[in-house]
Amino acid sequence: MSNRVAVVGVGQTKYAAKRQDVSMAGLVREAAKRALDDAGMTWSDIDAVVIGKAPDMFEGVMMPELYLADALGAVGKPMLRVHTAGSVGGSTGVMATHLVSSGAHKRVLVVCYEKQSESNATWALSIRLPFTGGSVTGAGGYFAPVIRAYMRRSGAPDDIGIKVSVKDRLNALNNPYAHLKIPDISEEMVRESPMLWDPIRYLETCPSSDGACAVVLTDEDTAKGTPNPPAWVHGTAVRSEPTMGAGRDVVNPHAGRDCAKDVYAQAGVTDPRREIDCAEIYVPFSWYEPMWMENLGFAPEGEGWKMVDDGSTSMKGDLPINPSGGVLSSNPIGASGMCRFAEAALQVRGMAGDHQVDGAKLALGHAYGGGAQFFAMWMVGSEKPNA
Amino acid sequence: MKSFLRDVAIVASATFETPSEPSRNEVEMLLPVIHDALGQVGLSQGEIGFTVSGSSDYLQGYTFAFVGALDAVGAWPPIRESHLEMDGAFALAEAVAYLQEGHVDTALVYAFARPSRGDLDRTLSVQLDPYTVAPLWPDARGLAGLQAQAMRDSGRYGDVPDVTPTYVGDGVTAVILATGDRARELTKTPVWIRGIDHRIEAQMLGLRDLGSSASTKLAGEGAGATNIDEAYLHVLYPHQELLVKDALGLDRQPVNTAAGPMMVGGLERLATAAKSIAGTGKRAVATATSGACMQQNLVAVLEGAAA
């Protein structure tokens, strides 16, 4: 049996369109230092460092673990760099968990970041390959038809995406690190914002952010001596499927369903809607909330939108989704998955401040990437998992 | 790590390497090699518990380049999978940790690159500090020359060979791992991973003693690299062989060195070591290196169960 793993520290930077006050090294160090402070540790307490981020071309630094080793106190230690598309923040957390559960290390620092203002992400995503046509539509262009397919299949009312946007932006007002703060957000404001990729409006998309998010993972013994309550990892899972292929359902991906089943089984969860207290899930476009409600088994197929419509996913509902404001409010791409994992941990530690879900004991962190083909999840709880 | 919850062995591997692959892309190079490795132990992708790869977007020339490589694996139904933007040897270290959890008992590790289409010396310079060093475009070979000179200046190595041109090669390597009884079931000659560790140094050359390899030494200690019969070293320039031998305390053992394709070379060393000692009862050390002047180094200790 593998060893128990605890999240004993969480650190985030302020997310913003341009963090020109810090270098890349300064950015990751800011988040890492806050996570170490939370854990009551210093750089020398750490045994290994794992970093994750989206493509190197987003900042123009190849294999940036080499450049960042010094800034993250990794000199003389093992250091790894994970890259699995938009899911990378989640995958990095999962891989780092294995470094502790395997007994390889006792104290692991995990840092994910993106500093999009250093370069041009749209350029990096638009490199034309030989013999292929480029759509140059961005992620919104890729996912808009998928959302249309969901609306048609489920018969969801047109305003569900708008409701998600308002809810997440209201939640963001209670998160000091959130990038977008729109105090007067309303359904009217979202509805009147420009249509970018029908049916996705400007205010239904995520921003482009600079930022970093870090966690400190430890074994059970080390967690006994940390100043703040730990979050215990009850399960981790990753799943991948190809970009294209017969039988793929991009609206309700097989890999996402398998990944959720895996993490629920590890955590002993049989009725996710009832047993999970809140979730931080990867929603870069508003409509992905109802879609993931179904993919994650919180709602029957075709009925995820009803959870949005009746307020179940709001802070006052029975399953608050993205109390932090989610990806719709802060999107440092390579860190966005780690933000979900870290925010889930903050909830069960009772340390989420003004966006705390009362009495949260079990929370899900979720990330996806590529053409909705890479998934990474973890379940964290306030109580130790069964051995 | 050198104490494992579960023993892990290399049970199969395959490699393809060429100075310059003229026509096939990464996926086309990978497909037959992955199937060769799987076929050696009679496995299909559906029976693999965890899949992990190493590659670099910068060498392939576009973002998310590893995504397409999944087509060589056949990720349907969906698979447990991850990717490191590192040499495949580091992906193998990740797989060894993953296998400790006990949910799965086999793993596929692969690495791929086709750097021949670019200017590798120039490409590698974007690994350096983006604010103060990379804008000067120092090339990889030139930096290796500083390392060779530092070794000469230290007076510790006798004759230090000149720096050769940076090796540019294309290729792929695939390795199959299995735990305990599953490994013994799959092959009569499993090669057990007795220790694996890796360490990184600071990037700034002025902060480092280029006349020795501190990270190789630490990784060697972490992996328990003693009583070694043979060595399979990943070195990019001839002088680096002296540094690795010094750091690992190798003297009379036969040493086999190679650079291999960038991102693949380290994993290839582990695979070649495993092939060489399978069934012999011998103990080998294999290394992988990354970064300018060997900034980051991995050491693995392998033991080929006697047939």
Image (cartoon, grey):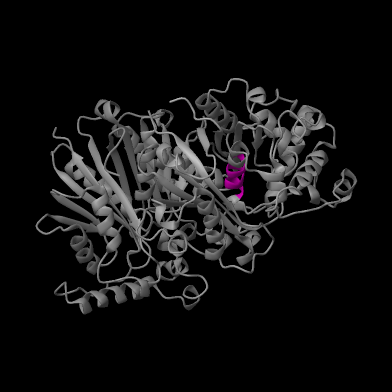
In this view, the residue in front, B180 or B51, is B180
Q: Using the image, determine if residue B39 lies above or below residue B149.
A: above
Residue B280 placement, left or right of A70: left
Residue A304 coordinates in the image, percent (x, y): 74, 29
Residue B135 coordinates in the image, percent (x, y): 50, 76
List the single residue furthest toward the left: B252
Residue A184 placement, left or right of A228: right
Residue A260 coordinates in the image, percent (x, y): 57, 29
In this view, the residue in front, A69 or A349, is A349
The stretch of residues the image draws in magenta is A336-344
- Residue B68 shows in this picture: no
Q: Quadrant of residue B140?
A: bottom left
Please give the name of the residue rendered at 60% of the width and 34% of the height, measured from the top-left corner: A364
Residue A343 drawn in magenta: yes
In this view, the residue in front, B194 or A192, is B194
Q: Quadrant of residue A305?
A: top right
Residue A53 drawn in magenta: no
